[in-house]
Amino acid sequence: MLQQTLAAEITQTGLGLHSGVSSSVRILPAKPGDNRYFVRVDLPNSPIIPAKVAAVNQTLLSTQLGTDEVYVRTVEHLLAALSAMGVDNARIEIDGPELPLLDGSAQVWTNSIATVGLVSQSVNDEYAPILILEPIWVHQGDAFVCALPSPETRFSYGIDFELPAIGNQWHSWSLSRNLENTFITEIAPARTFGLLHQIEYLQKSGLIKGGNLDNALVCGPDGWLNPPLRFANEPVRHKILDLVGDISLLGQFPIAHFLAYKASHNLHIQLAQKILELS
């Protein structure tokens, strides 16, 4: 069996969305079977945090891995880029508690991965694919996310906001048909977005300290504060980006159609946990 890792290291520095703290990330090739994992190089003994569902310990407006004392936050954009680009094994060194938001999308990460390239690795162990044979659902009110039996791995998402500039949006993207890596062009550039009327409350709650009009789209009653959008439905494409990153914590993408509506990181992770329990 073949896996892939990076052909060379990648480095990036920037502000974390919620902490507002600058951190530097160094992504290195890793050995076959090591999987993707984080290393907090700023802490004593450089503790390792695996990019696994079992390591998730918070899902408030981002996905956080680790424990109360040792954690890394807002991992979903980088993990989406690595997994969708086919990087099975990677050592991700970071000198702070939160990944840089960069431009609010995964575009910088995918461009960096494409620039350095990948190398194949032989793996002795055989990894059986995760097959979804029956529908698996989690929901909260009218929000839900599910994994449906499918011949391919596909992600479909719907959102619905009262603000006219967003409204009701749907998008669907197939990983299985990613022959020319359409993730780079269709999903990775989609930026995180926020609602103008929520910003003050979130900041008073200690969140989005690093958010600004250069790294997040902001929408108000009169439209977008910082146009133009990269896609007419950029917000829902960003939700697919988040879902891809969260599902990547399974270690591999199940062969399934992931369908979500008005969901959240919390529901994404609940679904991933349920898939693990049933597989």
Image (cartoon, helix red, strand yellow):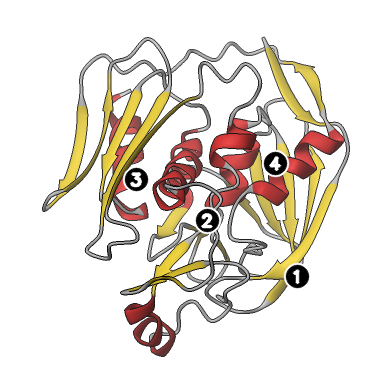
**Quadrant in the picture for the C terminus:** top left
Residue carrying label 4: 110
| CB under 8 Å between discs 1 and 4 | no
Q: Residue at x 65, y 38 (%)?
A: 82
Q: Residue at x 22, y 29 (%)?
A: 136
Residue carrying label 1: 42
Q: Which mark is residue 163?
A: none
| Label 4: element kind | helix
Q: Earlier in the sequence, mark 3 or mark 2?
A: 2
Q: Amino acid at mark 2?
A: Leu
Closer to us: 272 or 279: 272
Residue carrying label 3: 268
Q: Residue at x 55, y 36 (%)?
A: 186
Instruction: State which mark lies toward you, 3 or 1.
Output: 3
**Can you give x and y, in whole percent of width and height, for residue 110 in the image?**
70, 41
Q: From the viewer's perspective, is residue 24 above or below residue 242?
A: below
Instruction: State which mark lies toward you, 4 or 3.
Output: 4
**Quadrant in the picture for the N terminus:** top right
| Label 3: element kind | helix
> Tag 4: Cα neighbours inside 10 Å, few (<14), some, or many (≥20)?
many
Q: Earlier in the sequence, mark 4 or mark 3?
A: 4
Instruction: State which mark lies toward you, 2 or 1.
Output: 2
Residue carrying label 2: 229
